[in-house]
Image: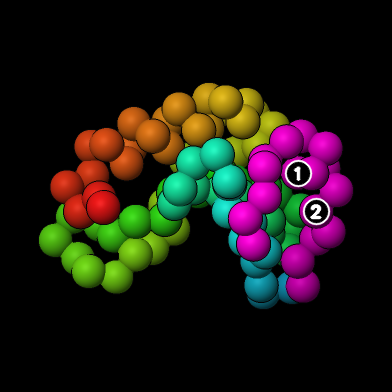
Amino acid sequence: MKRTLIYRFLKSVPVAPRGKHADDTDSHRSRSGSQGQHNGQKTFVLVSPFPGRKNPTQRAIGSCPAMTIDKGRTRGTRMARSDPARD
């Protein structure tokens, strides 16, 4: 689901069931978002294929709250621009 990632939202996301994860897409940056783990850890992710592959996968950008949302968006943009398989 596309949402504007803000700290209030990231703090309010419920913990995912054991063995699962919850994904939320950022409405400010395509192909990036957050992923919540069953242990409560939240990670910023970029969804794109690895070079030479067709299928997209989630790549970790950084951990929340160690990385700010703006820094995560900037790093995701930089990673997407250097990606040869970008759209």
User: Crowding at label 2, few (<14), some or many (≥20) Cα neighbours within 10 Å?
Assistant: some
Left or right position of 48 against 12: left
Q: Residue at x 83, y 37 (%)?
A: 8
Which quadrant would the N terminus be assigned to in this image? Answer: bottom right
Q: Residue at x 53, y 25 (%)?
A: 71
The amino acid at mark 1 is Leu
**Would you name the residue on which mark 1 appears?**
10
x, y percent for residue 17: 77, 72
User: Crowding at label 1, few (<14), some or many (≥20) Cα neighbours within 10 Å?
Assistant: some
**Would you name the residue on which mark 2 appears?**
13
Task: Say if residue 60 shows up in the picture.
Answer: no
Q: Residue at x 44, y 51 (%)?
A: 31
x, y percent for residue 27: 58, 46
Residue at the extreme left = 52
CB contact under 8 Å: marks 1 and 2: yes
The amino acid at mark 2 is Val
Relative vertical location of residue 36 with respect to residue 28 in this rendering, above or below: below
Region rendered in magenta: 1-17
Q: Quadrant of residue 63?
A: top right
Left or right position of 46 against 16: left
Who is closer to the viewer here, 4 or 14? 4
Q: Residue at x 38, y 63 (%)?
A: 57
Q: Quadrant of residue 82?
A: top left
SS at mark 1 in the image:
helix
